[in-house]
Amino acid sequence: MAKRTHFEIGGERVAPGTRARVDIPVSTLSNHTPVHLSVEVIHGRRKGPVLFVSAAIHGDEVIGVEIVRRLLRAAPLNSMAGTLLAVPIVNTFGFLNHSRYLPDRRDLNRVFPGLSAGSMASQLAHIFMEEVVRRSDVGIDLHSAAIHRSNLPQIRLTPDNERLADLGAAFGAPVMMESSLRDGSLRMAAEAAGVDVLLYEGGEGLRFDEAAARAGMAGTLRVMRRLGMIAAKGVPRAKARPVRARASSWYRAPRGGLFRGFVGLGDAVAPGTVLGAVANAFGDVESEVVSDQTGILIGRTNMPVVYEGDALFHVAETARAAAAAEGISAHLDVGALFDEDEII
């Protein structure tokens, strides 16, 4: 059997059976501080796929950073096959500023594959594509809801992609939802380059959510197991089958005012379910928000003060909502995802 070769990235070589942190130059701040795209490379002794795991493409979505931190300390990685490229913070600029965007207000996830001589966002997208994505076979991109919103842990995948459907089922998030590719997104650029990407959503911007962190960590390990990169020991089993949804609906504020939500993430809803209400400050005018779908609540606002048209609830449509809600409660049992002594 041929000896495994070094893995090359950012002008450095990582030997088989070792791990290294590679800092790829990106830019320099106005105060002369250098900015890097930092990648933790774990290059196994045995052959296997190259998987990238990325977080904080939107700088305020910090839950993915915590998931990567925990992943890099996980015991199953000690005898890994293949290669893991872990990038806890892609958008350093937004991360430092507690912002979704880059300093020029561009959304990094709308400029892929980028240009080597374009805007700051475009250059960063280009570096990430060339140094990380194109060196990989498959990827997991970690996200959360925006600030003031929360998402139920969920996997989004490209419709009619059987490989991603298989990996999404292995991930084992409470909900697996088909989601079309958007122009300029990492997923679209990666798939055009032949690299399939699962997108994980869970929790809220600028907040840690323990259930979302553990679901993301456990799911990533299960995908690595499915790819043959790690053994089964130390990889938690999913407590229930994911709910698969092919469509979803947003419910918006019918008026401006004070919002009260009556359903929580993971709850089953049906036509006629009152999701919440928006009232004026005097309490003499109130408008209910009523579901016209059968499904599972996968996202909601946390803001009590809303404008007319604000997104309040996100419902994944599924005919088996009531049964699915029971399985989701098992998914969200934090103690069931890991034993307490396994929290890292």
Image (cartoon, rainbow, N blue to C red):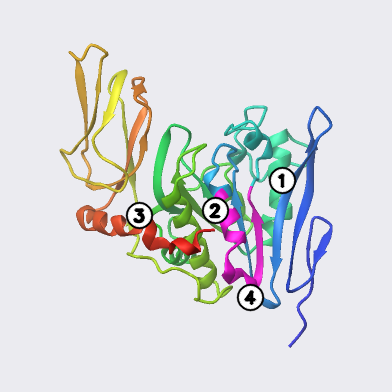
Residue 174 visible in rendering: no
Question: In whole angstroms, how far apart are the C-alphas of marks 3 and 2?
Answer: 16 Å
Question: In whole angstroms, how far apart are the C-alphas of marks 1 and 4?
Answer: 32 Å
- Do residues under tags 3 and 2 come within 8 Å of each other at their CB atoms? no
- Do residues under tags 2 and 4 come within 8 Å of each other at their CB atoms? no
Q: Residue at x 77, y 82 (%)?
A: 3
Q: Earlier along the polypeptide chain: callout 3 or callout 4?
A: 4
Q: Earlier along the polypeptide chain: callout 1 or callout 3?
A: 1
Q: Amino acid at mark 1?
A: His
Q: Amino acid at mark 2?
A: Ile
Q: Residue at x 34, y 48 (%)?
A: 247
Badge 4 marks a residue whose secondary structure is: helix
Q: Earlier along the polypeptide chain: callout 1 or callout 4?
A: 4
Badge 1 marks a residue whose secondary structure is: helix
Residue on which disc 2 sits: 67
Q: Quadrant of residue 331?
A: bottom left
- The magenta stretch is 66-88
Q: Earlier along the polypeptide chain: callout 2 or callout 4?
A: 2
Q: Amino acid at mark 4?
A: Ser
Q: Earlier along the polypeptide chain: callout 2 or callout 1?
A: 2
Q: Residue at x 71, y 54 (%)?
A: 39
Residue on which disc 1 sits: 126
- The residue most toward the top is 282
Q: Earlier along the polypeptide chain: callout 3 or callout 2?
A: 2
Q: Quadrant of residue 304?
A: top left
Question: In whole angstroms, how far apart are the C-alphas of marks 2 and 4?
Answer: 20 Å
Q: Amino acid at mark 3?
A: Leu
- Do residues under tags 3 and 4 come within 8 Å of each other at their CB atoms? no
Residue on which disc 3 sits: 332
